[in-house]
Image: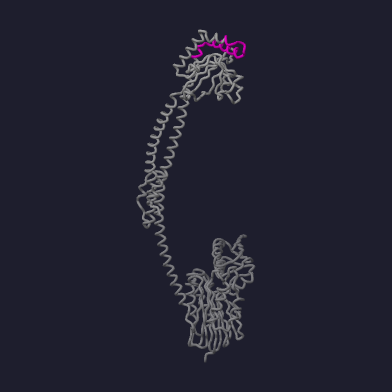
Amino acid sequence: METSAEKKSRLAFKLGLGIVALGVLICTASSVIGYHQYKETIEKQYNTTAYQCAQVALSYVGEQKLKEYADAVNAFFAGETGEEELDAIRSSGEYADAREKICTLREKMGANDIGLFVLDQEELMRYSGTKDNWTPFRYIMDGYVKEEQSFTIGDSISCNPDYINDLNEIALTGRRSDSYFFSDGDFGYNTSAIEPVLDEDGNVFAMVGVEIPMVTLQAALRQYLVYAVLVTVIFVIVFMLLYMLYLYRFVVRPINQIAQCAGAFVENNNHISSQLSEITTGDEIQVLAESFMKMENDIENYINNLTKVTAEKERIGAELDVATNIQKSMLPSIFPAFPERKEIDIYATMNPAKEVGGDFYDFFMVDDRHLAIVMADVSGKGVPAALFMVIGKTLIKDHTQPGKDLGEVFTEVNELLCESNSEGLFITAYEGVLDLVSGDFRYVNAGHEIPYICKKDGKFEPYKIRAGFVLAGMEGMRYKCGQMQLDVGDKIFQYTDGVTEATDKDNELYGMERLTAILTENSALPPSALLPKVKEDIDRFVGDAPQFDDITMLCLEYKERMEG
Amino acid sequence: MNITKNTEGKTLNIALEGRLDTTTAPQLEAEFNQSIADNTELILDFANLEYLSSAGLRVLLAVQKTMNKQGKMIIRNVNEVISEVFEVTGFSDILTIE
């Protein structure tokens, strides 16, 4: 793990690196550009000097005289005249005088060579890649620095092949070339001027060539480079230092501060540092710091809120647990329920879908010889349904009195429930009362599922009874009591719609056929074994699909008659 | 569940499609609360309703009570399964089913 100090310096390093790279680039570029411009200026200067020199040399000979010499040279090379004519020119006073002046000029100007010559254009263009037998220059006069190598009128020589095109251009147009005719010779780096001399018709009849060594050029360039680079480097370094200082002060340091505050916020249990408010760069970084500070405050508020909400939720959860327990404890859950009674066997179960459900069952002795069973389902779920269930269960038990008609019980209960029903809930309920002595079974049904009866043949069958309207649905409803006869060995099974409407993953309902089948298959079992079998079968059917409704079942077996 | 409604004068026709259970009942309840205020007749078409749970019954009961005060409510095209639900719960006594 890197320390934060290492990370911190990285931003400064990156920014610094960028600036150094930029500085190097600027130095290099300015040096290269400056060097080239400087070099060209100097070279131009030298070249101009060479042309001036050529002009002066020309004036020493005079154009008219030069034309004469040129004609003589041409006549000689055409084979019209011989050496004698040239010798005559060579030994004339004018020729010698002019050459003397040119030599002096060359000396004074520090030039390597000043030469006047005729260019044989046809010969020039005949160049075949070798200088052997190729002599386009025909000399008129030469003031070469080495006297013994100096040419004289009638000498013909080759030239630098690189100059062919430029020379040809000059001969054709009669204008000076743009080229500076650079060359590396015995005297270092040289530049040459080739000045064309025109006759009255504008044709080039001779040329004056001047070669000047650029002796001071290399040294001057070196000096220039040193100065230019030095100045640029110093300037760039100073600028870089100032800029880095600026960056550090207004970018790196504030960002480091923000990073530190963020770290501190995480490490010190959301401690909000006041350092952020000290960042006043007046730009995006300040905005960032402010946003960050706001975010820290918001997070703290959220956390505080969340803590409160969570505590509240936990409290509600705990209370719901209590409610679930109260609800469970309201349903008789100790079996065997009446161990001293041989006449009956009863068993009931409830599996709520949510924490608190709306289903309930009940059974109790109305008097010594009458047993009541109740099965009910409150519409809706959760706490409202559970509260309504408590009221319903209490009212039904309360109103079930010895000798009282069950229809009347439900009629009264319905009235009372309607009074306290602001939420529009209702209860489907079924109540039955068995006379243990006679087997007389009276019942009332308020919109509930019809019960299953198992007679001696061991077949559970739905017992069709007419249903009244649900409880708490509407005021003024009247419920009628029904009657049937149970024999010893008969069983009665009652349930809520959570059983038949248990749904598998394909939305298929468990249904009455499956229920009838599993009940009949296990009809020999006592109630306490039968109900778990049914539940198992439902679970198998439902599989992994979620349970939507409470699943509640009750089974009563009439085992023997009570002694009257 | 899909709810299709159209109004003809003071008559509101509502057709239900799918399952009317705990999850969809609030949707229908909201629809009723919003739509039935001015109507004297409410006609419910159950032709495409597949399933009806007690939560759905509760909504029907509530709207029946409201319509008792301002006119009448008729339920049409009830299939066998739902008809049995109305029968078992005694709702057939208080609803007008055609």
Q: Quadrant of residue B83?
A: bottom right
One can see residue A342 in this view: yes
Main SS category, magenta section: helix
Report how many numbered discs are placed on residues in the image.
0
Residue at (60, 20) in percent of width and height: A123
Q: From the image, which quarter does the N terminus of chain A lie in?
A: bottom left
Image quadrant of residue A71?
top right
In the depicted structure, whether residue A483 falls above or below residue A420: below
**Position of residue A185 measured from the top left corner of the image (x, y, whole percent):** 49, 24
Q: Position of residue A510 (x, y in %)?
A: 59, 73
User: In the rendered view, would you say A143 is above or below A233?
Assistant: above
| Direction from residue A243 to residue A503 in the image, left or right | right
**Numbered range of the magenta stretch:** A56-84
A343 or A536, which lies in front? A536
Q: Is residue A367 above or below residue A235?
A: below
Q: Residue furthest bottom?
A: A563
Q: Is residue A428 magenta?
A: no
Q: Position of residue A153 (x, y in %)?
A: 54, 13
Which image quadrant for residue A443? Answer: bottom right
Left or right of A229 on screen, residue A538:
right
Q: Residue at x 61, y 22 (%)?
A: A126
Residue B80 image point, x, y percent? 64, 71
Q: Is residue B22 left or right of residue A272?
A: right
Q: Give the camera-side residue of B13 and A116.
A: A116
**Nearest to the observer: residue A433 or residue A545:** A545
Q: What is the image's colouring? A: one colour
Q: Is residue A183 above or below residue A203?
A: below
The answer to if A61 sits in the magenta stretch is: yes
Q: Is residue B65 visible?
A: no
